[in-house]
Image (cartoon, grey):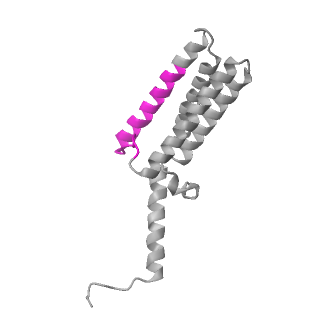
Amino acid sequence: MKDNEKNVSINEIKSSLKAIEKTEQDTIKTLRMPIWLNIFISGSYGMGVFSWASTRHDNLWMLGVIISSVVFFFAVAIYMYSKRLVGIKPKVLPTHKSELKFGFTIAIFFGLVVVLSRELSIRELWWVAYLGGAIGSISLGYLLYFFPTGNYRAGKSNHV
């Protein structure tokens, strides 16, 4: 037929797939934040959830909400600025449908953690405030470490 068509061997296909996988892994390594920053972001989020759940009639825990919010947004700003200095622009909004679904599911999960922690803590289950803060902190740290691109389709096996 045409001279431009050529047969591709199985080895060439395998090497191309390995190159694509390596590129994805390198991208994830580049976008992943340092552990200390991940601890600051997830810890301040967990402290914010705990403080919000423990707040009663504008007591001192509201100061914990304010301080943890400031630390959270400051740490996120450090991450965004440091990646921008390197020449990487982290995504803020999802670009694919799978990322939108993943983000929506995460938002519902974190919203439920905050609301249930607050409501159950008001109903005299004081230990739920601690549990909600721990769940929020640990799950955010996990998601920031293993899914820095916000895409669950890559799968955990690609995360190095």
9 vs 53, left or right, is left
* Pick the front one: 98 or 51: 98
Please state, as top left, top right, bottom left or bottom right, where the N terminus lies in the image. Answer: bottom left
Q: Is residue 31 visible?
A: no
Quarter of the image for residue 6 reads bottom left
Question: Is residue 76 found inside the magenta-colored segment of the image?
Answer: yes
Question: Is residue 63 found inside the magenta-colored segment of the image?
Answer: no
Vertical arrangement, residue 54 with respect to residue 135, above or below: above
Vertical arrangement, residue 2 with respect to residue 128, above or below: below
> Looking at the magenta stretch, what is its main secondary structure?
helix
The percent position of residue 90, horizontal first and vertical second, equals 39, 43
Q: Is residue 94 visible?
A: yes
Seen at 52% across and 37% down, the residue is 107
Highlighted range, magenta: 67-94
Quarter of the image for residue 92 reads top left
Q: Residue furthest bottom?
A: 1
Seen at 60% across and 25% down, the residue is 49
Quarter of the image for residue 137 reads top right
Vertical arrangement, residue 26 with respect to residue 40, above or below: below
The percent position of residue 32, horizontal first and vertical second, equals 49, 45
The percent position of residue 73, horizontal first and vertical second, equals 46, 27
Seen at 34% across and 45% down, the residue is 87
Seen at 69% across and 29% down, the residue is 131
The percent position of residue 60, horizontal first and vertical second, equals 60, 10
Please state, as top left, top right, bottom left or bottom right, where the C terminus lies in the image. Answer: bottom right
* Pick the front one: 95 or 73: 95
121 vs 90, left or right, is right
* Pick the front one: 27 or 85: 27
